[in-house]
Image (spheres, grey):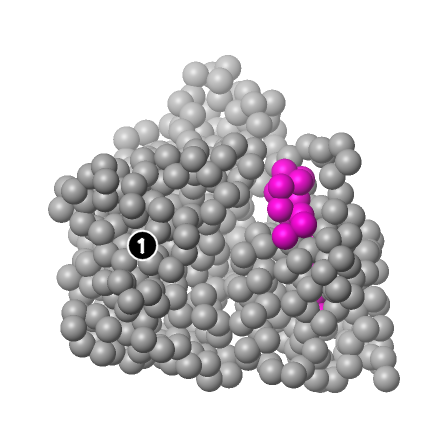
Amino acid sequence: MTPGLPPAMDRPHFIGIGGAGMSGIAKILAQRGAQVAGSDSRASATGDALRALGVTVHLGHDGANLADDASCVVVSSAIREDNPELAAAHERGVPVVHRSDALASLMDGLRPIAVAGTHGKTTTTSMLAVALSTLDLDPSYAIGGDLDAPGSNALHGKGEIFVAEADESDRSFHKYAPEVAIVLNVELDHHANYASMDEIYESFETFAGRITPGGTLVIAADQAGAVELTRRVRESSSLKVVTYGESASSDVRIHKITPRGLTSEVTVLIDGKLLTFTVSVPGRHYAHNAVAALAAGVAMGIPAHNLAAALKSYTGVKRRLQLKGEAAGVQVIDSYAHHPTEMTADLEAMRSAVGDSRILVVFQPHLFSRTQELGVEMGQALALADASVVLDIYPAREDPIPGITSALIIDAARKAGADVTAESAKDAIPDVVAGMTKPGDLVLTMGAGDVTDLGPKILDRLGLDGLSD
């Protein structure tokens, strides 16, 4: 199956084309034959990967970047109205398309699986994409992270299935009409867009209501927010719901999760039969993600035993407990965790994997609004580490909030008994870490901002003679 180009998407211009979501859509359009162009604020490996596909990538934002024959301008919610390229589009009457509408148009005529939830979307989407590819089903996919190389976050496949990460942060997942939807968990986050849990539930209900007739909602049975959403959906619709988890009431029940170093062995009861398979990444939460992927694939008509075997092929995605390297007996792993639940899950997974080895976290809070609402819980999560270094808040798209700093997290961590060091200078981190670590330790760079850049620098520094005795 080879869908054509959506209307007005034959010569698109992407503002912020290097972003995970934007670059994936751009890549698929280029693979479908569109003349794609865009701009980004800085050079990146993702930009280089797009150029290899024939995409024009401008560095910096300037109205002159917008070609005379551009058919539309694609934006995300992070693009501000004063962006010069967006202003040029408005002045010239070039249609402006939100990223979610562009992605929705790419799914037309295919069988979409949309993966939603406050945490775990990228991992679960990646698991499905890898497993379906292993089974030679040649899916299309759009993921919020790279699988194994820059630009590997998306692919235009020839099969009939399209797997997409469905972003709830700005309600853009309301644009999709999936055959199967996964909801991994429902928690309060994205405080700039949601004022309460009721708003979150309403948003996820709307998403569930977009599932096509005859489709299926696959949803967690062990997480309180997902349980409440299930109750609401069942009260208001006749939608087919398949629950998964360790709860005895689960339709796909997890009987056992056995940690095996940096992997897990999972046994589930599905369709009345026990099935055991390997998940090639550590942690209970990743095992649950794999079972969600299994349940979704079965809902699409794929035999469970085939899919279970194929899930073993998934070995991780960049920034999701990704091993960056080892130097002087110290392993450095990168974690995208930025919400307290994610931080706790990744730290528990690492503790299970490394046993008595010390765990040191370099944490960069992400967003002022998130820190304002969840900073105390972030600090409490850091108490699971043996020691932590906390950087300043990474603002991303937000302006500062008076009085909200990393001190909120540090104070909470210390009250929870954590060993925490504050460090505002990113350039100082390699030396700070070298002075704190010993052979056998594990260092986690943690957060959704540019803290990921520190891993290689820490390894370089550890490769010298900077370990403490």
Q: Which residue lies at the image location 53% right of the left edge and 64% below the top edge?
A: 345
Seen from this angle, which residue lies furthest front?
248
Relative vertical location of residue 114 with respect to residue 381 in this rendering, above or below: above
Quadrant for residue 305, please give it.
Answer: bottom left
Q: Position of residue 123 (x, y in %)?
A: 43, 61
Residue 54, can we see it?
no
State the extent of the magenta-drawn residues as a range: 360-377
Q: Quadrant of the C terminus?
A: bottom right
Q: Residue at x 77, y 52 (%)?
A: 411
Q: Residue at x 78, y 66 (%)?
A: 419
Q: Is residue 160 above or below residue 349?
A: above
Residue 300 in magenta stretch: no
Horizontal and vertical percent for residue 415?
Answer: 76, 57
Query: Is any atom of residue 355 visible in this view?
Result: yes
The quadrant holding residue 277 is bottom left
Would you say residue 365 sits in the magenta stretch?
Answer: yes
55 relative to 429, above or below: above
Which residue position holds label 1? 219
For this rendering, which residue is in front, 222 or 91?
222
Where is residue 361 shown, x and y percent of the image?
Answer: 69, 65
Query: For this rendering, which residue is in front, 387 or 93?
Result: 387
As shown in the figure, which amino acid type bears the numbered disc 1? Answer: Ile
Nearer the observer, 159 or 462:
462
Horizontal and vertical percent position of residue 301? 15, 61
- Horizontally, residue 307 falls left or right of residue 408, namely left
